[in-house]
Image (cartoon, grey):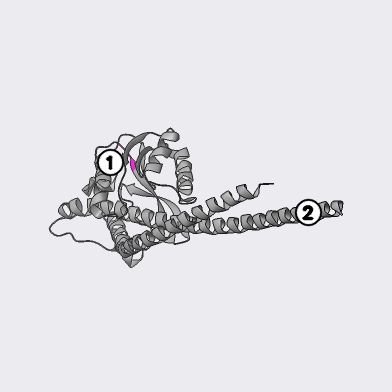
Amino acid sequence: MPSLIQLKKRISSVTNIAKITKAMEMVAASKMRQAQIQALNSRHYSRKLDEILTKIASTIDTSQHPLLSSHAETDKEAIFIISTDRGLTGSLNANLFKTVENFQANHRADIYTVGRLAKEYAIKSDFDLVAAFEEIGDVISYETTQPASNLLIKEFLAGKYDKISIAYMDFVSTLSQVPRITQLLPIRQEDTTVTDDSSMKEYTFEPDAKSILDWLLPYFIEMKVYQSMLEARASEHSARMVAMKNASENAKELKGNLTLDFNRNRQANITNELADIVTAAMSLS
């Protein structure tokens, strides 16, 4: 059984840990709110753009732009993984990496990463890590995501890959984040077997299709990467806040149990001392 001194030290240690986790919870909550607002504000625009571009891709000749179809002479693939730079996010990164591992079992794609933990995971798993982007920052801007999206577009247009996918944690709510892997390039097409009016629309391009697509399609890819990073960042801060909240509650519970043990031991010591005093007094009498 631990001594009173040991219990007192453990209570003090747990109390300090609880203070740290509570402070981290408050910081994460503040960052979470900002990240959620940023992700949600651009989500509707990004998804509407995705919907429109997907319909356009299904109604035009894919030969009109190289981003609409693969021109690679190989079936090699790549996957762009978006993770966190730091831990203390519960099972967030573990769930993402498990999904990537299942994907890799069938594809064995080259790896591009954002986030220190994704880079370390790729190296540890002996995957082919081609490029790693780090230190994106807590506040993500469209400009900071462009180097990654431009590199992926460049590699695809060079014919290095037949397909490029993106893996990230999709923000659902503060308590729920879902790992997703979606195709980034070539831009996917809707199922054209549907014959409703919306799927059979014809599009007129002014001044011409090539001029519009040369600007619109790369922008679409850049926006998709940007929105994925926003979703991943909102998921990160949400998961960290919940993890720190749980840690604070566990520390509080542990402190209560240790305090109870401390009081029991102290009471037992007092009882033993009184018993010794009474025994000694009876012996003298």
User: Which quadrant would residue 162 be assigned to in this image?
Assistant: top left
Q: Eyeballing the image, is 114 above or below 140?
A: above
Residue 255's disc is none
Residue neighbourhood size for the residue with mark 2, other residues' Cα within 10 Å, grouped as few (<14), some (14–19), many (≥20): few
Which quarter of the rendering shows the C terminus? bottom right
Q: Earlier in the sequence, mark 1 or mark 2?
A: 1
**Residue 143 drawn at (x, y percent):** 23, 52
Q: Of the residues shown, which amino acid type is indicated by label 1?
A: Phe
Residue, far front: 285
- Residue at 31% x, 58% y is 50
Q: Is residue 264 left or right of residue 253?
A: right
Residue neighbourhood size for the residue with mark 1, other residues' Cα within 10 Å, grouped as few (<14), some (14–19), many (≥20): many
- Residue at 43% x, 56% y is 24
Distance, label 1 to label 2, CA atoms, is: 87 Å
Q: Which residue is mark 2?
A: 277
Q: Eyeballing the image, is 150 above or below 226?
A: above
- Residue at 48% x, 43% y is 102
Q: Which residues are magenta?
A: 157-163
User: Which quadrant would residue 205 be assigned to in this image?
Assistant: bottom left
Q: Which residue is mark 1?
A: 156
Answer whether residue 23 is visible to the viewer in this image. yes
Label 1 element class: helix
Q: Nearer the viewer, residue 215 or 267?
A: 267
Q: Nearer the viewer, residue 179 or 137?
A: 137
- Residue at 57% x, 53% y is 11
Label 2 element class: helix
Q: Is residue 173 left or right of residue 225?
A: right
169 drawn magenta = no
Per the picture, the main secondary structure of the magenta-coloured stretch is: loop
